[in-house]
Image (tube, rainbow, N blue to C red):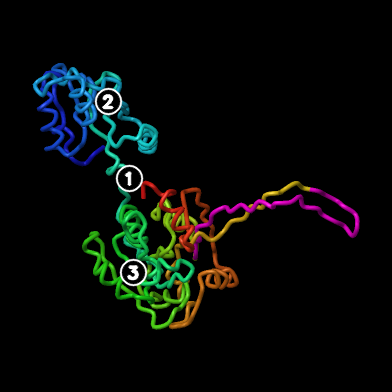
Amino acid sequence: MSSHKWQICVLAPSNSVRDAIDNLITSSKKIVLVVSQEGTFEGTVSDGDIRRGLLRGIGLQSQISEIIQKSAVIASPEMPRETVKSLMLTHKIQQIPIVDQFRKLHGLHEWDELDLSPVRDNLFVVMAGGEGRRLMPHTLNTPKPMVLVHGKPMLEHIVIRARANGFREFILVVHHMSQLIEDYFGDGSKWEVSIRYIKEKTPLGTAGGLAQLSGLGKEPIVVTNGDVLSDLNYSEILDFHLENNASGTMAVRQHEIAHPFGVVTLDGLRITNIEEKPVQRNYINAGVYVIAREALSSLEQDAFMSMTDFFATLLSSKANVCAYPIHESWIDVGRPEDLNEVTTKFKEL
């Protein structure tokens, strides 16, 4: 239920359309909850209902009973949080009244409240030092993580999503055109987070810069590449890592390669199998990780290390390394065609 007072958006059926407009403005909840004098929930009124009513000739002094949405989607007080979120997604709405079997109003579910993750003390690290040569000419005068997607740098989308997932402490590992990144994000106060920087004198790969975090703190860190955009919930992969007591957790995504020809299997000259245009399925590295602090001790200061080699090192030391399969929307923006795809694939980014 919303932590804010939902009672401020309750009106009676006899209230006017003007009253409903004023209520929408003052409450900022984008919905009016209509309750009868007997305390029975009658329905809802939205800005769209008002506009449609006015187009039908309803006046501002008309009663809102003439425009009530009586078939509004409602939730019972016992309905689980995830079910409420699913209802919102299905019906493309951001508020659902909480109504019991006797049609008594108990409150209002709001998307922003339901989707709010608890604040996490863990560092959120973004590897943002890449040049993005394959993204030329977009990266001619712009560091790769600052390339715009829907009017914002990719890196800003990552920060906003991570903040929504509960993270407040950020470290950006920078190198190429780092001043442009620092000038844009500053200390992070614009986004109500804290942002610090690790500046690489030379490129250290997708893991090398993390050596500076070794020995600083005890909580696991969440790491993402600065060119990976996804609907992944970063807080959930952190919980998965903790539940499995892992040294390192890698987000992986299934990738399919369709063979264009029939594949023939031979034993000498004898054909043993023929498979028509088989599809090969593998899991690929999705560029998002959770790493235990003690695991960082294997990294050498100012030494180049890719994340693939770092995880291979963990595996060779018999550390507990886990995969976190993701089904959410995901894209690695490495090429101009990827940039074109992300503008349509992530319309709600």
Q: Which residues are magenta?
A: 248-274
Q: Which residue is mark 1?
A: 115
Q: Are marks 3 and 1 in contact (CB under 8 Å)?
A: no
Front tag of 2 and 3: 3
For mark 2, give the secondary structure.
Answer: strand
Q: Which residue is mark 2?
A: 99
Any mark on residue 171, and which?
Answer: 3
In the rendered image, the quadrant that contains the N terminus is: top left
How would you rate the neighbour count of disc 2 (Cα within 10 Å): few for under 14, some for 14-19, many for 20 or more?
Answer: many
Q: Among all residues in the image, which is located at the extreme right? A: 269
Using the numbered discs, state the Cα–Cα distance from disc 2 to disc 1 in whole angstroms: 21 Å
Q: Amino acid at mark 2?
A: Val
Using the numbered discs, state the Cα–Cα distance from disc 3 to disc 1 in whole angstroms: 24 Å
Queried whether the magenta region covers residue 255, the answer comes back as yes
For mark 1, give the secondary structure.
Answer: loop
The one nearer the camera, 218 or 82, is: 82
> Which residue is at a point 44% across and 58% down the rendered structure image?
339
The one nearer the camera, 296 or 178, is: 178
The one nearer the camera, 151 or 95, is: 151
> Which residue is at a point 32% across and 55% down the rendered structure image?
166
Q: Amino acid at mark 1?
A: Asp
Q: Amino acid at mark 3?
A: Ile
Queried whether the magenta region covers residue 73, the answer comes back as no
Is 39 left, or right, of 260 in this rendering? left
How would you rate the neighbour count of disc 3 (Cα within 10 Å): few for under 14, some for 14-19, many for 20 or more?
Answer: some
Instruction: Classify 321 as above or below 110.
Output: below
Q: Main secondary structure of the magenta part?
A: strand
